[in-house]
Image: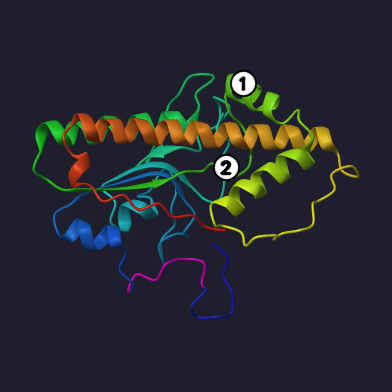
Amino acid sequence: SYKTDFSAYQGQLPLEIPLISELLQTAGYRTYLQGKWHLGSVPGMQTGAALEPAPNVRGFDEFFGFLGGMAAPYPPVWHRPYQHNQHAIEFEEGWFSIAGLNDKMMQRLKLQFQTEPETPFFVYFASQSPHGPLQAPEVLIEKYRKIYKKPLEDIWTDRVSRMRQMGLFPPGSPAKIPLFSGKDVDVLRATAATRAAMIEATDTAFGKLLQLLEESGKLENTLIIVASDNG
């Protein structure tokens, strides 16, 4: 979303470059986006809650999420960062976006399975987790607080050891154990616990989506691709 002097980096996706959502929509697929759209606006057009959002212009029939880089998973009721297509999503106090957006998208997907069972579908599950601001249900955070009470050096050593066994790290690498003593360890523990809780909440939401596909008889004929940005 940052414009530069380079033609290939204008802060938005050029219209002449087709997206998979546009290609599949043209081929007769129903297309859904749940979560985050941090791919800029549509060239020559302002996007926002009052106008047609960029995802709908770029091949998505249904958009449940937010425009931009970040939004609070627990938004205040007076703030409406989340939307269904061009309409702001209404919610009660305590609404949690990672679960709430997924539930709304699944309701529409389930309706398709009931009314258009033979129509193919494409779902882009673009989770905001674990991007900041870091927020998650307290019961999940408490679960991971207990894990991160152990010395952080021990946690690091155990995880690196497992990754070596899995072949993700070469034997003996990395050899240097980071030192946490000079840092605010309580802040590190709280941050790690909240981030882990957000990831579990995302796993749960994605698991509910897979359960819907299985119950609807769609899972065996569905290609699932998992990707990550920024490592």
Membership of 13 in magenta stretch: yes
User: Which residue is drawn at the image coordinates 52% and 51% (left, top)?
Assistant: 68
Label 1 packing within 10 angstroms: few (<14), some (14-19), many (20+): few
Q: Which residue has dot 1 on it?
A: 138
Q: Judge whether 33 appears above or below 197 on screen.
A: below
Asked if the residue at tag 2 contacts the one at tag 1, i.e. Cβ–Cβ closer than 8 Å, the answer is: no
| Type of the residue with mark 2 | Pro
Q: Describe residue 229's horizontal placement relative to residue 132 as left or right.
A: left
| Type of the residue with mark 1 | Glu
Residue at the right extreme, as displayed: 182
Q: Describe residue 153's horizontal placement relative to residue 72 as left or right.
A: right
Q: Return the x and y of residue 92 as percentages of the image width and height.
A: 48, 19
Residue 89 shows up from this direction? no
Which of the image's four quarters has the C terminus?
Answer: bottom right
Which SS class for mark 2?
loop
User: Which residue is drawn at the image coordinates 57% and 42% (left, top)?
Assistant: 130
Q: Nearer the viewer, residue 66 or 174?
A: 174
Where are the magenta residues, as a range? 10-16
Q: Return the x and y of residue 201 as percentages of the image width and height.
A: 50, 31
Q: Which residue has dot 2 on it?
A: 130
